[in-house]
Amino acid sequence: MARIVMKFGGTSMAGMERIRSVAARVKREVEAGNQVAVVVSAMAGETDRLVGFCREASSLYDPKEYDVVVSAGEQITSGLLAIALQAAGVPARSWLGWQLPIHTSDAHASARIGDIDTGALNESLERGEVAVIPGFQGLAPGNRVTTLGRGGSDTSAVAVAAAMKADRCDIYTDVDGVYTTDPRIVPRARKLKRVTYEEMLELASVGAKVLQTRSVGLAMKENVRVQVLSSFTGEDAPMADTLPGTMIVGEEEIEDVERQLITGIAHDKNEAKITLTAVPDTPGAVAAIFEPLAGASINVDMIIQNIAHNAGSTDVTFTVPAADLARSIEALNQARGKIGFGELVHDTRVAKISVVGVGMRSHAGVASTMFTTLGARGINIQAISTSEIKVSVLIHEDETELAVRVLHTAYGLDAEDAA
Amino acid sequence: MARIVMKFGGTSMAGMERIRSVAARVKREVEAGNQVAVVVSAMAGETDRLVGFCREASSLYDPKEYDVVVSAGEQITSGLLAIALQAAGVPARSWLGWQLPIHTSDAHASARIGDIDTGALNESLERGEVAVIPGFQGLAPGNRVTTLGRGGSDTSAVAVAAAMKADRCDIYTDVDGVYTTDPRIVPRARKLKRVTYEEMLELASVGAKVLQTRSVGLAMKENVRVQVLSSFTGEDAPMADTLPGTMIVGEEEIEDVERQLITGIAHDKNEAKITLTAVPDTPGAVAAIFEPLAGASINVDMIIQNIAHNAGSTDVTFTVPAADLARSIEALNQARGKIGFGELVHDTRVAKISVVGVGMRSHAGVASTMFTTLGARGINIQAISTSEIKVSVLIHEDETELAVRVLHTAYGLDAEDAA
């Protein structure tokens, strides 16, 4: 017997027919002898509908009341799944955020989960009842409803799994696992059987959008084994304990034999490049650039300071999220007098390509393989950044697919039998 | 300064534009110096949508989970109205059923309200905040969500008014008050300024569907002054404390001078007449008829036992709700051996006409005026029943409008200036 958490997203909960097939999936796990808690999202589109009402009510809506409104979506699907499970002969009940309760901070609309009381939940699980828990919601000090921010149901699932000491947290999603890269670009991309939390964090934050980043961070902190697997397979799908998806685990769980130098290759076209020319090459000049951006809560990613090409001045290049480009330009222009740059040049036709893998900790040469491979294809590198388990380069957007493909081959990631 | 409860139904909450005009209405009461709690229904159509999901999930759905699902509708409108009030500059917050809490019985889907904790509510009202409270929902022992049954928001409003010792409970609805009879039948029907709880109960239960019957019973028990008034009037509508609608009060509040013999005339076409012929005229025979109907929870209303026309047998005629006719026939046929009747004849083309008024307690002749008036128009009376403040007759359905009109004139209820 195992204790497992199963999490289903909005597409899986979109209408009673799909909710019934979720119930059938849950029933298989119960019949296999497992104790099961299910964390659910609202029906696809429902949260947008409710958020739309709040915005219509006031552009400056009270986040406390917003939370009351939008948490209703998961409340509805929780009750409906409990009914569908009972109809399938599986004892079940819903546990709303305030009923368990799932304690959170009082940062309404983007609360963080604290403790989860598990006394009543454990008794219910021991009685053989499936616990259906709405994702995305909790209870703040002062007895008010909170929500965790969009996509928060993944985090709810991991937090519930940690609290109930689950053996596994299965996240059912519209992909069947985490791949070495985007299979739409590289048909020979392989599904990873295991990936470490840290790799997953790098892959998620650079564009492999499978799990909410916060949920991966929480899983790492609480050491919850998270499996990503497909919700779109029928009755004859393999049981989840045969690990048909991708298991996200601590590094110690990955055997040396299956360890690759590089685990995956991610790409992200949502960056914009800004270059400030003729910045005075003096102490404090760079700080003057990034202070106003930090003040506007804009995340700066890659930064290059060129060697001073004229006496006393230099160019500084960096990237920001494309969505923040307009605000970045405004902030920099306002600080122009203080920074003293010549021109501001920007470019959204860029892509960030990252190779990620814990294996590179113990192997040199990862970065040079990357530069050599891209150089051989004539792909120009506009910026570079590195972390302990990642090397990223900025290239022209049009070369994204080519770069991903040649790197996938260069690092030996291609599947042996092509798709 | 007064303490008032304002209750708005689903039509008033159908979309943000209408919710904003509810907020404007509430703001006027706050600016007049009142402490205000608002009880809201779900958006029109929303409860049906949620009930539909539950039925689709299972025809035998768990009422505990049904309550979780359908209570979401009022949760949503509560949050939205709180936002709209804040946007209009009125301090406001929502109080969900479990937050106050509104304690109820554990009869899920048709719970009865018990105590309402008012400690936190009173503090909030004293601070000048408007309390927005979802109707229809409460909290059962064991910390589960309950709902009160369809139309329960009227009852929520009256219960909240009683708990907070409100001076008045204003029910905003799609009519502007209670009339002497249906104005679609009698254009000269007059709006009543005051009506007693008991009259309202008789008028409501016989067809003047303005307020949920349970809410009137609760108002009578708790002595809550309830005003019915229109939600469809603009900014220039008279203030509610000028009592532009109909006030439902105890008999002692109605001055002798404004007391009429008859307060109103109701009609109800949802009855069916059943006649059993040749029932043995022996002790226990009548009991044998009504036992199986009571066993099937069918409400029998008017009953006539004819004088025995043949030696040892008689006809028995009674009415049941038309919706229960099929079940009634089934129950009676199953008990046929025990009852021993000849034929079962039924007729749904009947209408019940009732004249209601506390004035008839001290005046004779009400019933005879009714019979004489109907007889003069050739309207045949098929059955009669009376209570302390009501006389009802059963007639052919086609004569409903004529009967209501001639009675309205006969009892002096016609307005002086015709509409």
Image: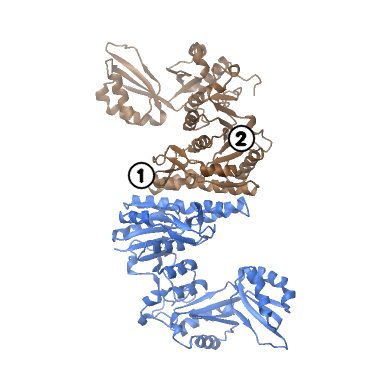
Chain colours: A blue, B brown
Secondary structure of the residue carrying tag 1 is loop
Q: For this rendering, which residue is in front, B209 or A163?
A: A163
Residue at 28% x, 60% y: name it. Answer: A33
* Letter of the chain that mark 2 sits on in the rendering: B
Query: Would you place residue B221 above or below residue B83 in this image?
Result: above
Asked if residue A45 can be seen in this view, the reply is: no
Quarter location, residue B29: top right
B5 to A201, vertically: above or below: above
- The quadrant in which the C terminus of chain B is found is top right
Determine which residue is flagged by label 1: B60
Position of residue A36 relative to residue A380, above or below, is above
Residue at x 45%, y 54% (from the top left corner) = A97
Residue placed at 36% from the left, 69% from the top? A244
| Amino acid residing under circle 1 | Leu
Mark toward the viewer: 1 or 2: 2
For disc 1, the chain is B
Labelled pair 1, 2 in contact (Cβ < 8 Å): no
Q: Position of residue B362 (x, y in %)?
A: 51, 13
Q: Position of residue B90 (x, y in %)?
A: 63, 46
**Label of residue B133 in the image:** none
